[in-house]
Every structure is written in C-alpha cells, then in structure tokens.
Amino acid sequence: MKNLNNIITELKLQKNLLREDFKLLLTANGEEQKSLHKTARETSQEVFSNKIYMRGLIEFTNYCKNDCYYCGIRKSNAEASRYRMTKAEILERCKSGYELGFRTFVLQGGEDPYYTDEMLCDIVKSIKCDYSDCAITLSLGERSYESLKLLRVAGADRYLLRQETSNAEHYLSLHPQSPNSMTLASRQKCLFALKELGYQLGCGFMVGSPNQTLDHIIDDFAFIKELDPAMVGIGPFIPHSKTPFANELQGGLGLTLNALAILRLMKPNLLLPATTALGTIDSSGREMGVLAGANVVMPNLSPPKFREKYLLYDNKICVGDGPSRCSNCIRGRMKKIGYEIVESRGDYVEI
Ligand code: SAH
C-alpha cells in the first residue's frame, strides 16, 4: 500500500490523484491527517502568507421559492418567520461593514422573485457608488443568463452558487422534482454562464449531506477541476429540525477538514472559506479550517433581528451578535492562531 505522505506530495505536485488515493486522503486520521493539514497550510501560506480575507455577509431575504430538502428557509417551512431587507437597510449594513474594515459585501438570500432585476441592479449600483473600493458578491441562487448579465454590468464582481453535489442522482435526492424541479444540469449551466460573464466564481458543496458517498466528493473534485472557479465554499451538512432531513446525521469535522486540505493542494491560489457551518459543529471549527488550508472568513453583517430568521440549519452560531462583535471575535480568533485579517477586497489572482 502507498505511503500517505507520498500521496500528499503527489497531490501537491500533480494537483490530482487517482480515485483510491483521494479516498485515502479523505479518510486520513491521526498523524497522517496532521501531515495532510500541515502541507495544505504551508501551501496556503506560500500564496497568502498569514493573511486572511474577510467578507461581510448580508443575508437580505429569507423568502425562497425552492424547497431543498436540507435547507431551513425552504418554501415549505411554514414556521420560518420571513423577512426582506429594503435597499436602505442593505446600504446601512454596508456602511457599518465598511467602518469595520470590510471591503467585500456578499448579498445572499433565498431565491426570492420579489427582488426584480431592476431592483437588484439598483442596489448593486448604489453600493458601488458609495463604496467604489469594495467588491460585491451575489449569492442569489439560479438566475437566467440575461439577469446575470444585467447584474454583472451593474457592477457585481463575484457570484457564489454551490453545485451542492456533482452526481445527478444524488442531486435529485437533495432537491424536489415537482412542481419546481431542480436539476444538476441547470445548476451547472448557470455556473458556466457565470464564468462566461466574467464573474469571479464560487461553487461548493456540503460535506456529509444525506446519501453522499466518498465517490460523490471525488466527483465534486473533478467538477471543480473542470469549472476552475476562484472560490470553493464547503461546510458540513447540519440538519434543520423543520426539514425532511431533520433526523439525518450531520457531516463530519475530520472529513470536512480533509476535503478543505485537498482543495488547497489541488489549487494553491483558491479562495477557500472556513465556513460558519464549520464553526457551528465545533467551537474551533473555523480556526481548524484555516489550519487545514482555508484563507477566507465570512462574518455576518446582519443585525440580530434578521439573523435569528436566516436559519439554514439548527444551532447556527453568532445569531445573537451584531456585526462589530462578530468582526472583533473573528479577528481575535485568527490572531490567536498566528493569522491576520486584512482590509482588502481579496480578489482572486491567477497564477
Ligand atoms: N439561495 C442561494 C443561497 C443558499 S444558502 C443559493 O441557492 O445559492 C447557501 C448554502 O448554504 C447552500 O448552497 C447550501 O450548500 C448551504 N446550506 C443550506 N442548508 C444547509 C444545511 N442544512 N447544512 C449546511 N449547509 C447548508
């Protein structure tokens, strides 16, 4: 059997592996796991030094027309108390974020047709006008090519859309097929459209989602190689009590960290967030993510009155905190492990 250290070296050099070898890395534990994370961390430091980019997340609507089985703000969750932020409220979030040193704003929400292209373009233009040194990331789910084009022209720089899984059958098991059918093909089509439109693109997947196998994760690695995104967001699946997946197991910490480390070695300049979901399954999850190769954190800029309603999964952290507390907390956490949050747009740089 191959030595795991040789496999880690091979991944660092070749940026790819045989399926069996990916499996060995995904399931690594003990000393071997430490060595995987150390190599990924060093690879990240070669590109980003000890600098961590910060993105301010503005969860501006929890209305959603979709019914994803895993998600707490799915349409059928009648117990979710719904809200929408006005343009003024969104701009207010940017103002407080800017003062706290944020130079990227991520507008994320459910798929909410209330916000027309016109309204969204107007919001994007206004943010760009007031904060011309900031990047805008959108995370609005699937939209038409035309709509994505209008938003890009209005000034949006980046777009996050997780593929969720790269296996069509697995995708079907996570999303309802009627009346609003969701398919992997349309998800992927949207991702390639975003790329063509010149967005800095983020894709990603949940680790440990119901029915996911190691082979599915390796299919995700292959898809990521093909798409060649600027960013990959991965975090553990965490059940939400008011969804069909309420009784499913949450994704594993070790598996998530190993997947992060593998992605870092596959693509040294990738923007790789240590996600809130990772911080939710373990109180040091985000620190461990950075120590396994992540280089981005995404604290929340929403006030508690909205945060407590944007619950994709149970036990989400920092729900009662305001933006300045979150930003201070994450700065302190990063400092403690020898990293520093930088006040920069943190754009993707090709190498
Ligand atoms: N409507 C947008 C934003 C979705 S929320 C879109 O479709 O892109 C952002 C991400 O949260 C999702 O892509 C999903 O991967 C993740 N998510 C949703 N429910 C989750 C859960 N129960 N556990 C962990 N992550 C979850």
Image (cartoon, rainbow, N blue to C red):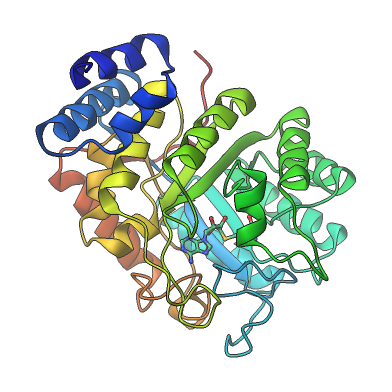
Query: Residue visible at 37% across and 25% down?
Result: 20
Q: Position of residue 128 (x, y in %)?
A: 67, 47
Tell me, yes or no, if residue 268 can be seen here.
no
For this view, does 163 lie left or right of residue 47? right
The relative height of residue 118 versus residue 43 in the rendered view (above or below) is: below
For this view, does 105 lie left or right of residue 44? right
Q: Position of residue 339 (x, y in %)?
A: 22, 38
Query: Residue visible at 45% across and 71% down?
Result: 313
Q: Position of residue 202 (x, y in %)?
A: 58, 39
Query: Residue visible at 69% across and 34% down?
Result: 199
- Observer-nearest of 96 and 276: 276
Tell me, yes or no, if residue 296 can be seen here.
yes
Q: Position of residue 31 (x, y in %)?
A: 10, 32
View extreme (bottom): residue: 79
- Observer-nearest of 151 and 98: 151
The relative height of residue 224 versus residue 65 in the rendered view (above or below) is: above
The quarter of the picture showing ligand 1: bottom right
For this view, does 322 lie left or right of residue 181? left
View extreme (left): residue: 31
